[in-house]
Image (cartoon, rainbow, N blue to C red):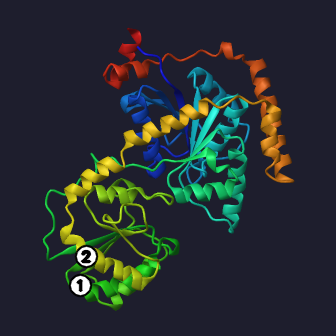
């Protein structure tokens, strides 16, 4: 068997059985990297009774460490409390590179910090957009600045996301690569039977809050229904703006044309992100025309400004070109444009460049943290010096050579096409 190229540790607080864009991204990217011959291990926190080591499709090994989520599926920030178990996993799995996901993940930030202290190359993927003025964004941006001060390479899922990340963290743009999300076109296919030309259904899936444009729907829906008697709306989601939508439906007597689904289980809808909307890709893969911001080619999406009149105009344009849309042709284009295998190959290039970067001493690394601000820089340096001392203490208490390395059993089974359920039989052989 050929030598493996990389042994990658994917890290995030967000992974299955939780459902979302980050979770899907980590899973599909890991599966494609396994097919390319790499070893991939996922590190996340426990979810309910799911704790310990689990194996998923393709031999993907997942560590559900016994920490419980503290806020919005994030573990409580301990800074140093996670170091011993993270060090053990890195050594046991013979990891060569660490890949962290999502700026809001506490586990991601702490693992990248400890990995750099131990001399590992680290890559970070930012999946979201954040502002600059509110208290939450200011706090998150300072944490991101600390983490990315010593990151080897970074990945963003769109060019807008790259600009946002560079501005928030001060990371040199040449260190940041843009690799878009993709879609599993095998799951999202055009319907075998289309609705008749005499009926048009517009679906809205979103949290019904101001930031998601719920107030625009209150003005857009009545106007579209007035212009097109054959149009009906299906609105999925819940939030504080749901009351306004229901009031609008009553006021204009649209009960039979506007269906309010309320909160919809994650498993029943497509996933959403801020920096790169996977839901748009999934809709296009199903052959559905989309009205949104610029993500897809112009003939697959109709652009609109966040203004009621402009959105009505965009919907009218979409309805006019709808008869010319071939769902199967759109599906085939999506299969070529947004493919997880392509994402994995481009990510592999980033890994290769990261591993070619020269190693740096503690003093060289501290100079990067020092440049983060007059007071913040000194605080960051102190945090990293303590982290370095803890690492040396752990080396004394339990030398690296005393930690048993794990055989790559799951990967061998995967490469021989054997079922994961037969992993122990494979191990005994």
Residue 381 percent coordinates (x, y): 82, 42
* Near-viewer residue (320 or 416): 320
Outermost residue, top side: 429
Q: Which residue shows up at 67% across the image and 65% down it? A: 132
Q: Which residue shows up at 28% across the image and 83% down it? A: 255
Residue 176 percent coordinates (x, y): 59, 47
Residue 211 percent coordinates (x, y): 52, 72
Q: Which residue shows up at 68% across the image and 35% down it? A: 82
User: Which of the image's four quarters has the C terminus?
Assistant: top left
Q: Which mark is residue 54?
A: none
Q: Are marks 2 and 1 in contact (CB under 8 Å)?
A: yes
Residue 23 percent coordinates (x, y): 46, 46
Does any portion of residue 229 appear in the rendered image?
yes
What count of labels does the image hold? 2
Q: Is residue 63 left or right of residue 395?
A: left
Q: Which residue is mark 2?
A: 319
In terms of image quadrants, where is residue 354? top right
Q: CA distance from mark 2 to mark 1?
A: 9 Å
Q: Which residue is mark 1?
A: 228
Eyeballing the image, is 221 above or below 407? Answer: below
User: Which of the image's four quarters has the N terminus?
Assistant: top left
* Near-viewer residue (337 or 78): 337
Q: Is residue 81 left or right of residue 186?
A: right
Q: Secondary structure at mark 1?
A: loop
* Mark 1 residue crowding within 10 angstroms, few (<14) / some (14–19) / many (20+): some
Q: Which residue shows up at 45% across the image and 72% down it? A: 208
């Amino acid at each position: 068997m050929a030598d493996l190229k990389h042994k990658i540790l994917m890290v995030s607080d967000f992974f299955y059985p939780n459902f979302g864009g980050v979770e899907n991204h980590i899973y599909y990217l890991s599966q494609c990297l396994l097919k390319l011959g790499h070893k991939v291990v996922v590190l996340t926190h426990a979810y309910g009774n799911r704790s310990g080591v689990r194996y998923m499709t393709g031999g993907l090994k997942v560590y559900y460490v016994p920490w419980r989520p503290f806020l919005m599926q994030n573990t409580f920030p301990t800074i140093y409390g996670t170091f011993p178990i993270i060090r053990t996993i890195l050594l046991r799995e013979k990891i060569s590179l660490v890949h962290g996901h999502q700026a809001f993940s506490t586990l991601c930030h702490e693992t990248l910090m400890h990995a750099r202290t131990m001399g590992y190359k680290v890559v970070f993927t930012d999946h979201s957009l954040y502002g600059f003025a509110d208290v939450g964004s200011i706090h998150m941006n300072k944490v991101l600045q600390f983490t990315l001060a010593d990151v080897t390479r970074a990945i963003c899922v769109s060019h807008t996301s790259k600009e946002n990340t560079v501005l928030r963290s001060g990371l040199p743009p040449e260190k940041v690569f843009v690799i878009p999300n993709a879609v599993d076109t095998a799951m999202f296919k055009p319907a075998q039977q289309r609705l008749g030309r005499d009926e048009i259904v517009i679906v809205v899936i979103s949290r019904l809050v101001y930031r998601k444009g719920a107030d625009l729907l209150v003005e857009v829906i009545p106007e579209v229904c007035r212009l097109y008697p054959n149009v009906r709306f299906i609105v999925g989601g819940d939030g504080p703006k749901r009351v306004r939508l229901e009031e609008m439906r009553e006021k204009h007597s649209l009960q039979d044309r506007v269906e309010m689904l309320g909160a919809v289980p994650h498993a029943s809808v497509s996933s959403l992100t801020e920096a790169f909307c996977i839901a748009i890709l999934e809709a296009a893969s199903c052959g559905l025309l989309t009205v949104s911001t610029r993500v897809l080619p112009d003939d697959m999406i109709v652009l609109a400004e966040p203004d009621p009149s402009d959105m009505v105009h965009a919907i009218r344009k979409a309805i006019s070109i709808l008869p010319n849309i071939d769902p199967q042709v759109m599906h085939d284009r999506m299969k070529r444009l947004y493919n997880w295998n392509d994402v994995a190959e481009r990510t592999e290039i980033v890994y290769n460049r990261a591993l070619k970067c020269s190693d740096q001493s503690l003093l060289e690394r501290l100079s990067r943290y020092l440049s983060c601000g007059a007071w913040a820089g000194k605080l960051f340096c102190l945090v990293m010096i303590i982290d370095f001392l803890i690492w040396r203490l752990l080396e004394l208490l339990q030398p690296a050579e005393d930690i048993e390395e794990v055989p790559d059993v799951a990967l061998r089974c995967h490469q021989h096409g054997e079922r994961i359920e037969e992993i122990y039989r494979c191990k005994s052989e």
